[in-house]
Image (tube, rainbow, N blue to C red):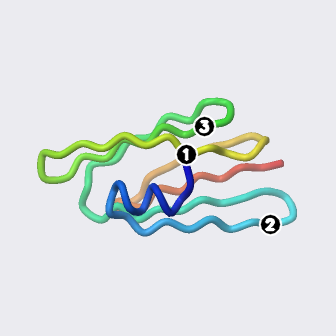
Amino acid sequence: MTLEHLSQQSGSIARRYSYDDGEVIVADFGTADVSVDVLEDVAIVVAEHDGEQTQTEVELPAGEAQAFINNGVLTIEVRR
């Protein structure tokens, strides 16, 4: 799934940044309750807002990924 699809499905603003040593994916979910599970090549993002829940799978590039959420902003860092 692309970040554009994530933005449309969840109502968030999402961006992907590429660097020499990896990528950073950032999505702002505002006041939604968000959780994320990172598997080897996919991040499963679940967002709940106003009683409505959406689940999205975001394909990740090859590398070591870690995710964290701070004030409704999801950040996934992938190191190559």
Q: Position of residue 4 (x, y in %)?
A: 50, 63
Q: Would you say 63 lies left or right of 3 here?
A: right
The label shown at residue 18 is none
Across and down, in percent, residue 49 comes to 20, 52
Which amino acid lies under the numbered mark 2 shown in the image of this protein?
Tyr
**Amino acid type, residue under disc 1 in the picture:** Val
Q: Earlier in the sequence, mark 3 or mark 2?
A: 2
Labelled disc at residue 58: 1
From what the image shows, is residue 46 above or below residue 74?
A: above
In 3D space, how far apart are the residues under numbered discs 2 and 1 (Cα atoms)? 19 Å
Tag 1's secondary structure? strand
Separation of residues labelled 3 and 2 (CA atoms)? 19 Å
State whether residue 74 is above or below residue 55.
below
How many residues crowd around disc 2 within 10 Å: few (fewer than 14), some, or many (20 or more)? few
**Separation (CA) of disc 1 from disc 3:** 5 Å
Q: Earlier in the sequence, mark 1 or mark 3?
A: 3
Q: Is 57 left, or right, of 47 in this rendering?
A: right
Q: In the image, what residue type sits under mark 3?
A: Val
Tags 1 and 3 in contact by the CB under 8 Å rule? Answer: yes
**Relative to 61, is 25 on the left or the right?**
left
Name the residue carrying label 2.
Answer: 19
The mark closer to the camera, 2 or 1, is 1
Disc 3 versus disc 2: nearer the observer: 3
Q: Earlier in the sequence, mark 2 or mark 1?
A: 2
View extreme (right): residue = 20
Helix, strand or loop at label 3? It is strand
The quarter holding residue 32 reads bottom left
Q: Are marks 2 and 1 in contact (CB under 8 Å)?
A: no
Q: Residue at x 24, y 61 (%)?
A: 31
Q: Which residue is mark 3?
A: 42
Residue displayed at 83% across by 48% down: 80
